[in-house]
Each structure stands twice: as C-alpha cells, then as structure tokens.
Image (spheres, grey):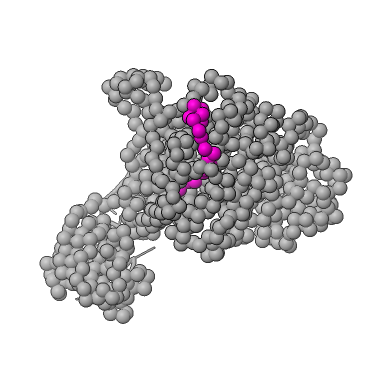
Amino acid sequence: MCGALRLSDAGKPAVLMGWVNRRRDLGNLIFVDVRDRTGVTQVVFNKERNPALHAKAGELRNEYVIAALGKIRQRVPDTVNKNIPTGEVELIAEELRILNEAKQPPFLPGDTVLPNEELRLQYRYIDLRREAMQRNIELRHRVAIAIRDYLSAQGFFEIETPFMTRSTPEGARDYLVPSRVQPGSFYALPQSPQLFKQILMISGFDKYFQIVRCFRDEDLRADRQPEFTQIDLEMSYPQPERVWEVVEGFLTAAFKAGGHEIKPPFPRMSYDDAIRQYGSDKPDMRLPAMTDVREAFAPENLQTLGVSATLPVVAIRIPRVGELSRKERDDIKPLFKAKGGAKLFEDFKRLEKNFPEATSAVRKKAGTEADDLIVIVAGDGKPGGHPSEGGVKPEVKQHDHAVYTSAGLLRVALAQRYAAKHGAFSKTGDPGKDYRFLWVTDFPMFEYDEEGQRWAAAHHPFTSPHERDMDKLESDPGAVRALAYDVVLNGTELGSGSIRIHRQDIQRKIFHALGMTEEEARARFGFFLEALEYGTPPHGGIALGLDRIAMILAGAESLREVIPFPKTARAVDLMVDAPTPVSEAQLRELGIQVKKT
RNA sequence: GGGGACGUAGUUCAGUUGGUUAGAACGCUGCCCUGUCACGGCAGAGGCCGCGGGUUCGAGUCCCGUCGUCCCCGCCA
C-alpha cells in the first residue's frame, strides 16, 4: 500500500496501485505521487534509465489510476521529505500501467482549499478521496466495530428489525412507503425501532442491540439528517444504573478507538438541577454553571430594576473575556432570546455603580474572577408579567423555567462568541477536560403542548414514570418525573433512554393522561398493548447517535463530514439527484395520484 | 413556515460612487528544465458575473422576483 512503505522496505520490489495525486515534471526526471487509502508514495521516472517508460509517465494526469512496478529505494539524505511518513523512500519505476484515465475533475483531492459544499456533494466520490474524509469514514468504522465488540462481549445480540413497518403518528413525521399489494395503504420507515426492541424483550432476547438506520421527516440542521444511525439497545430487568454502565462501557471503547481514554462513571444530574444550573437539559460542563443571585439584591433593588421578586435572578459567568466596549456590549443583546418575561442586564459595570453592595455579593456568590464577563438574566417585574401558577407545582415552575432557559441559551451563545478568549472549547489533549460527559436524569414525564392544548409525552409514551409519582398522573401531570435519562457530551445530546412501562394497566393510564381514548390507543398500539399482557419483563434501554459520536471524535462541525452520502438542508442528495418525480405508470400501480399545485 | 449569509473563469476569491476590453491565485494546455515534493520558468486557452424581469444613455454593481448551498428559529415523542 502507498502509505505503508518505510525505510525497512528499501531494496524490495513493489507494486503500487492508486491515483496520480500530483505530478512534478522536471524534464528528464518525473516524480509522481501515487495515492491510495493509506497515503502517498513518490514514484520516480528517469529518462536516462528508461526513455520509453519516462515518455509514458509524461502522459499521466491528475487522478489517473495507475500501477507502478519497481524497486523501493532509500532516498539520499538531502532529498528526504520529512512531511510524509513515506518520505524516506521512493519507488524507482520499472514498469507503468495506466489502469484508467480520468477527466479533469472539478476539484482535486489534494487541493489545499475546499470547494463549496454543493460541489463536494455533487462529486462526492471525489470528495471522499480526500484524506480527511478517508480518515473520518475509517474512524466511524473503528468506532462502530468497537461498540459491536463491546456489546457482543457483554452478551448482547445484534438483531435486525423491519424498515418497512407501521406508521405511529406520535413524534416526528414519518417517511411513508406505499404498498402495491394493498393500494392506499402505507408502510412507514422507522423513526426508531422502539416498539420492536420492547417486543424483543417480551420475546426473551434479554439483551438486544442494533446499529441501525432511523428516519425522521423533519427539517435538517448541521447535526440532523433525515436518515441517521442509532446505537439502539434494550435489556430486561435493569435499573437505570445498569443501562448507564453499559453505555459508559461502549463509549469508553468507542473513544479509545478514536484515540481518547475517557474515564467512567460519568457524573449525574437531575433534569431540574440541569435547568437551574445551566438553563438547559443538555448542559455544556466545560464552562461554569449559572448562579441564582436573587438573594444578593435587596427587594428595593429588584423593584428599581423592574425585576420580579419571585422569579430567579441568574448570573452568567464567562471566564477570561475581559473588558468589553460599549459596542461589544450592544452586540450581546441580540444573542438574548427572551422566553416568557425574561430580561437581560448586560452592563454589569453599571449595576456595580448603582448597586455596589448587591453586585459584590453577586461576585462572591458566583465566585467570579476579575476578567470574567458577567451578565444577569431576571424575570420581568411588570405586574401581570407572569400569571399565577395555579394548582400546578412542578419542581421547576413554568416561569422560573423560562428565565433559566433564556439564560441558558444566552450562556451558550456567549460561550461561542468568546470561545477564543475563554479557551474552554479548545482541545487540551486531556480527555477528562475535552470530553465532559454527563447523565441527565429524572426528566419530566409530560410537557404541555400549548398549540394542541394538551399534555404530550416528553420522551415517548412508553417511558415509565417514577413509582412515587404514579398518583399524580391524573391530578398533576406536570409534576410527574420519568425514569428517563440522556447522555450528554459537551452540550450535545448523544443519546436518550428510559426504563419502560411493562404493565398494561400503567401503559393504559399514560395514554389516558395524554388524552388518548381507549379506542385511539387500541387503534394505534393495539398489538403492543396486547403483547404487554403476555408476561412482559421489566425492561429499559437507550439509543445513541452514532453520527454525532463520530462527528465529535472527528472534530467536525457537521454530520455531513462523517456520513459518506449525506443530504442537503432541503433533504436532497445532490449526487444521485433524489428525490425525483416518478412515472405515471409507477403511480398508477400504487394507486397514487399526485395533486398538481 | 420564518430570519440571516453567500452565488463572478474548472476551483478559491477580488471587482471602488453604476462608466472603456471583468482581474488575481491555483488548476488546465503547450514548450523548457535531472532531485522535486504546494517544483520552477516562459507562453496560452478559459466568463450567460446563478436565472428572469425592472430602473438607467449605460448594470457584475441599484430594485423586484426566482433558484441553489450553508447557518439559525419553528419542527425533531
């Protein structure tokens, strides 16, 4: 292989097959770098040695596929290339075969500047030849293998589940597949193998996993593709801690495959604490937590500032930002997206001038350093700014929640803006600092859907509530906590799971709390409710995004860098040009008519 | 569905207040060159300025629309 040759190979005959990466024609001497998956090696053609061969080498162009036969030779000392691993040797060509010519490609794998992404996606086969992409795809392979090996060694079976399955209109939109045999009926591509893996528990396969494609017809983001790969697993009779242990195990193996030694167990934090301290259910632990500093202010202070005396007053601290100009402070304002009645105070200096005692108490409480950026987010104190909470008393109340999450979003936005100053996002080489994992636990069971005026499942409707909250299912759904957990890395949700409901009567209650009638539940999940009645063991599991793990390990900003054939923001594959209209005949066969607009 | 950025040579980009023949670098083609490695030198080819309309004596530049790519909000149990 092109990248494998070393000094110890000197004197050996060799055949190099690969692409012409670069050609340097010095006249009577031609150098050709031959590239394959493993790297590049220089091949030398000398007119003096072999005029016919040298002439043939003159015909070579970029991206021709060739076989070069010859002998490996140690380079003389002052011609060694220290920049590449094979730089101490070269192949002295004795024979050259042009296996295939190449049109001039729109860009070259060896180019130093990348073309725009549209072109990269259209000519993905050329883009994938680039060393960085080869490395990312290899990394992804190694990570997947490490996870398979680990789970298999732990007694998990990898079991396939159908891609053509039943549409369940909870959650994301389904991709539909029309049935030819039953016109007017559709399969759905799975958003996840959720029900199948629970059925597998009912079937006695007490440890299941699958590295499996999932499909969701929702709008895309840099970290969201319509088809993506999950590491899906489920086990019978687990405590949440047992699931976490398994995940920590395979993530350790995966990160080792990516060259990083991480150390489980990961810290754990309840959802409520995450909201209070970070204003997010996926806290980035690389930066300091927020602090509620309401107590630092006297009630009169709060009133003067027009701030609610009952809602939290949150201090956000970003280290090492230093002094900000008036303009820089103004630039902060648009980063703040107020939810509910949240208010921003971005000029801490002014607060210090007007409220010296309160602000010094804030500094003390938040543990600030001199060059920290401090901003305050508080609840609007206008009368009627926030209606009463009524009888509903979740642990973090709705309007508190709005202040915390507004602050949390600002914290992340500020951290991104001043990343160069605080340096918390730059890699140190210490996996304990670079990769801050976290378990977020005890999620709320339900979220109130303002639009639909009803309670909706926060995770999914098969999640088990906490035993202690069972009696609140009807009376106070907002206060019910679920046995649901997320694994979070550096502010990114890597995976989400739960202990499931294994009793049909409780499952029924949940559907009821979600406002689903008995008939609706039967119509949608009848097969599953029935299965629950035939001796279902307690079970639980989790699913993690393989693409996101690969992305983080590759240090990439987009999933597209670790997916060989990704789709654009409009869910289009630019290489194959999909989706496309289909013929009338195909539609007719499926009993489908397309409405012209 | 909404907001923002971008679209000029094969590629990456520049293009002033609207004004003569739209430039650079890399790549490409030809010639020269025996130790280069992002080789070097000389010469050359290459443009529907995304597309459509408008304003103007005159549009790459201004206006409207449209298409495409990217980022964000909504959405993603």
Nearest the camera: B45 or A399? A399
Q: Residue at x 15, y 74 (%)?
A: A48
Q: Residue at x 77, y 38 (%)?
A: A380
For the record, the magenta segment spans A528-546
Nearest the camera: A531 or A329? A531
Q: The N terminus of chain A appears in which quarter of the rendering?
A: bottom left
Say if A161 sits above or below A43 in the image: above
Residue A460 lies in what quarter of the image? top right
Give the residue furthest to the left: A52
Please state the total of marks drawn on the protein image.
Answer: 0
Q: Position of residue A431 (x, y in %)?
A: 54, 62
Residue A162 lies in what quarter of the image? top left
Q: Residue at x 76, y 29 (%)?
A: A390
**Side of A245 relative to B25 (left or right):** right
Say if A396 sits above or below A422 in the image: above
**Side of A412 relative to A195 (left or right):** right
**Side of A546 relative to A575 (left or right):** right
Say if B48 sits above or below A323 in the image: above
Give the residue furthest to the right: A300
Q: Quick check: can you spot residue A492?
A: no
Q: Residue at x 81, y 55 (%)?
A: A361
Q: Position of residue A307 (x, y in %)?
A: 80, 41
Whether the magenta-drawn stretch holds residue A231 is answered as no
Q: Quick check: can you spot residue A116?
A: yes
Give the residue furthest to the bottom: A77
Nearest the camera: A190 or A321? A190
Whether the magenta-drawn stretch holds residue A530 is answered as yes
Q: The C terminus of chain A appears in which quarter of the rendering?
A: top left
Q: Position of residue A496 (x, y in %)?
A: 54, 43
Q: Position of residue A455 (x, y in %)?
A: 63, 29
